[in-house]
Amino acid sequence: MDPKERKKLERQKKKAKALERKSAKKPNVASLKPVSQPTTSHKRPSEPSGSSAAPPAKKQQIEKAKHLPVPSNYTGPEKFLTPSHPDFHDILTRSYVGFVHEPAAAQPREFHAGMRAAFEHLRDKGYFQYDVVMAGGKHLSRTFVRRTLVGNFGITYKYLGLRIFAHAWDVPSSAAVFRNLYALNQAIVARTKASASPAPPSCEYNLTLINYMEPDNPVLGLKDDLTYDMGKVSVSWHADSSLEDFSSIGVYHTLLPTKKSKKGPCDWRIAMRLSPDVPGAKTTPPLVVPTGDGDVYYLNGDFNHHHQHMVLSGTAVRVSSTHRVAVTAEDTLQYIQAKVTAALKSSAKDPQDKCRRGHADDVRHEQTTVTTLEMDWLRQYWIQGDKHNDLHVDWQQPMLALEASWRKLEARTKTLADALVQSHDVDDLKVLKAVLEGLRNRQVGRDQFVHRMKDKVFKRIAADFQPMERPVWTDWDDVHLLPKDLTATIAALHAHKLVLESEKKRQWKIHAGTRHNKINKA
């Protein structure tokens, strides 16, 4: 491989890793959004009447300031407060507006029975699985909790470098357990709307992330909270991401008995604090709230926008169902299907024009779609194992269809690349560069997935959830598609690019010389 080309590939890899680290630094989407304290909803307290008028500012800045939490100037020695502290309620109602708690007794018995029956079914049928994520963008790790995602057909949820795929709860083919969860979700939507006056904005939940936590599992190695000395941490400080702006969150929490032990005491707790970048975060103490078996919590309005929370481990098995309004702009099956359909249509416009001359922008978009389809959907789906595919019944046919579309687009890429290598027309340079950029990105992505699949963290994952490499190149693919290792193809295209650039420079010099002579004669 040409040394210059090798260096360029290395730069591409470093750039991709830097972008991955940057995206992974976004707030963790870990799981539940519990909150605390048996109270009713609270309106945000007004500013003190003696405060001076705000200085002139842009309208957007003023609107943002209206939603900032009111800080508390607590000067006590405690690192955090619990409900037994005399200042707890005042700080809760002042600095943690948007949090609403409903004790288990507020819900009918049928609601609790339905939730627990669904959780036990999911557990017994093996739906809960560990995720392998990349916290901090550097090292892979296995989550402390096992989880599964349920929601609208085609919805997914991406966090810490992993895309998880929802079991559909709203189509005729949905399993009974998922249809029941949809009905229970609608009940939580109704309760969220009734939890505050006026009703909280945006609480039509389109998915729920269900976490199953076994604190007595010796392999977990739960760590202590070193910042506030709150105890063992199940889910560290975070605010949920990939949600519709200022949407509410509803969390149902319960304990389940296991074969090893009966249902134990409910000693799980939720910690809350102002986000570190919010004014007054240093003077407003975190709050720690015990959670009762069957409690429901709501984080209404902008609470998640300005606060973080953490789950402190108890002793019994805990299941939480976090109902959310997830962003659907780019994270749905319907989105990627539309992108792929557009790429197939665009790449088939003029079969006679093999070099796609004059369509560099279209080619660049098509190549981006192929890379996104392979790296962000196909490989993300299969890296979670064969059992993952068996469980996700409503994703099986769509994923096969997406893989078939990927093959069509890859075959067209090979046809285009072969034609470009044979072209001696400098007008094909822009298209050649677009293809070269797409192939380089694809090679970087494939190298990263190969490296990822070899990580030792997968030794801690069950055999039927071991990563699988898909797409797999068949004998047909070896003839009609570019190879999995694109190094030689990239080198050939790069070398031909240099030839065309040299020819373009030569033609430009001839043209410039001719023009100069005409000017002198004039």
Image: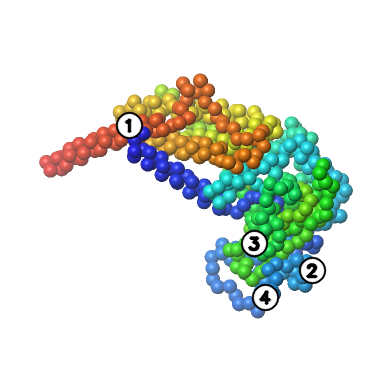
Q: Are marks 3 and 4 in contact (CB under 8 Å)?
A: no
Which-is-in-front pick, marks 2 and 3? 3
Q: Which of 494/463 is in front? A: 463
What residue is pinned by disc 4? 75
What residue is pinned by disc 1? 496
Q: Relative to residue 64, is residue 1 drawn left or right?
A: left
| Amino acid on which the number 4 mark rests in the picture | Thr
Q: Which of 196/255 is in front? A: 255
Looking at the image, tell me whether mark 3 or mark 1 is earlier in sequence order.
3
| Amino acid on which the number 2 mark rests in the picture | Ser
Residue pictured at 43% horizontal, 37% vertical? 440
Q: Relative to residue 135, is residue 285 drawn left or right?
A: right
| Amino acid on which the number 1 mark rests in the picture | His
Where disc 4 sits, the SS reads loop
Where disc 2 sits, the SS reads loop
What residue is pinned by disc 3? 226
Other residues around mark 1 within 10 Å, as few (<14) / some (14–19) / many (≥20): some
Residue pictured at 75% horizontal, 69% vertical? 88
Which-is-in-front pick, marks 4 and 1? 4
Where disc 3 sits, the SS reads loop
Q: Relative to residue 186, is residue 483 drawn left or right?
A: left
Looking at the image, tell me whether mark 3 or mark 4 is earlier in sequence order.
4
